[in-house]
Amino acid sequence: MKILAIVLVLLIVLVPAGLLCWLVVWAMRRGNRHSAEKAAAKLLFLGLPSGVPYPCAEDAGAPIFQFTPEKKQGKTTIPSALVVLVAADVPCDLRLRLQSRLDRWGLSLGLGRTLVTGDQGFDSLVYVEATSVGFAEDLLAKPRSREEITNLLKNGYQTVDWLAKTGQISATWTGYTANAEQDVAVVGAAAGGLEALLSLGAGIEAGPLPDWKFRYRLGLAWEWLVGLALVVGIGGGFYFATQVYAPLEGNLWHVAPWIIPFMLLSMVPVWMFFRATPQGHQSFVRSFWVQLVLASIAAYPVYFTLNGWLDQQPPGVAEVPVKGTESSRNKNTTTYYAVLDARIGGKMVHRIEVDDSLAKQIDSGGQVTACLDFGTGHFGHPWKKAIHFQVKEIKNKFNIPGWLQPPNGFGKPAK
C-alpha cells in the first residue's frame, strides 16, 4: 500500500508539473513581448503628441531624451520618468542600478550575482546585472567608468542600461519632476556621462553569453513545481492524516516546531536555481512568502502522516469507558465527540469523534465502551488503527434525561 501511495503521489505531481512548466515558459515569452510593446507605447518623446513613436538617432553617439509624465491607471499611479539615450553599437545587455536593502540581503544569503570590483564605494552603491561578465569586468576595471556611473546614480538616476537589442545606452530617472530651468542641465550631464561610458566601452568584446533567460525560466518553473508538490502534499497529507493515520488527539501545537524546518527544506531547490540568476534574490523573496504559507498548512498533515507511516512499534489495545459527549458547531454541521479523558499509549486522549446516533445513545444514559487498536506513533503520538464501540443500553421507562438519572440508571439492562 505504501509503494502504491508513493507511485500515485508521484504521478499526480509529475504529470501536472510537466504541463505547468510548459505553460510557464509559454506565458513568460508572451508576457515579455506584451511588456515590451506596452513599455514602448508609454514612452513619449518630449514635445510630441501621444502615440507618436519616439525618434532614434541615426548617428551613433547622438543623445535623445524621453519624458513620461505621471499618470493613473486604475488605482495604480505610474510615476513620471526621464530617460536619456545614446544610440550605440552595444555588444550585450548590462544594467547598473542603485543597491536596495533587498539586494544586500540577497547577497548575504548567496542569492543573485553581482560583480565585485574591489572599489568599496562603488560596490556598496551599485548592483551589477550583466549578461556578459567579461564585458562588465573589463568596463568596470577602468576607474573612469566607475566614476561616471557613480556620478549618474548619485545625481538622481536610478539605472544605467546597455541595451543590445535596441542598440542604446540609457540612464533612467524615475519620479523626475520636469523643470524648465534645470531640464537642459540634467539631460546634458546624463548625456555627457553616457557618451563617456560609450567611449570607455568601445572595443570591449562581450564574449560568450550565458542563457540567463533559460536559467530564470527554469528556476521559475521549479518554483511552481515545488509549490505544486506542496499543494498536492497538503491534499494527500490531509487524507492520510485524517483517514489512514488519524491521531487519537492532535492539534497544531504538536507540529508548530516543524513548520519553519519544513518550509526551509522546501526552499532548498528553489534557492539552488535562483542563486544562478542576476535577479534571483527578488524571485526568491516572493517564493519565500508563498511557500511559508503553504508549508505552514502542509506541516500538520505531513507530520501526522509520517507519525503513522514510519511507526514500527507493535500495536496496542485499550478499552476505555466513555464519560460523555461534546459537540462543535459551525454554520452547516455539528461534530460530535465521545469524551474519554484517558491515558492511551502514554498520551492523554480527551475525546474521539463519533457520529450523531452514537452521541445520542451516550446522552440517553447508555453505557458505552471504546475499544481501540492503536499505534504508538513514530513521534510518540498514538494513532487509531481501528475503533469500535460497545453499547450497553439502559432502559429509562420514566423518560428522565440522562443527566438526572442515578449512576446505575433505571430499570434492568437491555438484553
Image (tube, rainbow, N blue to C red):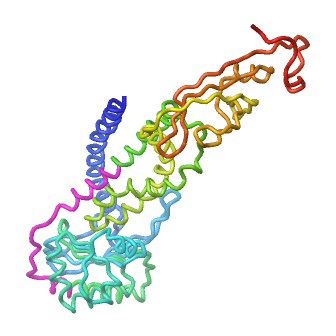
Residue 288 in the image: above or below residue 166: above
Res. 324 image quadrant: top right
**Residue at 34% over, 67% down:** 43
Which quadrant, please, contains the N terminus? Answer: top left
Measuring from the top left, give residue 236's x and y in whole percent.
44, 36
User: In the rendered image, is residue 163 in sight?
Assistant: yes
Residue visible at 17% across and 69% down in the picture: 164
Which is more toward the observer, 224 or 354? 354
In which quarter of the view is residue 3 placed? top left
Taking 7 as reference, is 201 above or below it?
Answer: below
Q: Main secondary structure of the magenta part?
A: helix
Q: Taking 85 as reference, is 227 left or right?
A: right
Indicate yes or no whether the magenta region holds residue 226: no
Front one among 8 and 164 = 8
Q: Position of residue 130 (x, y in %)?
A: 22, 72
- Residue interval drawn in magenta: 196-224
- Picture residue at 37% right of the left edge, 57% below the top: 267
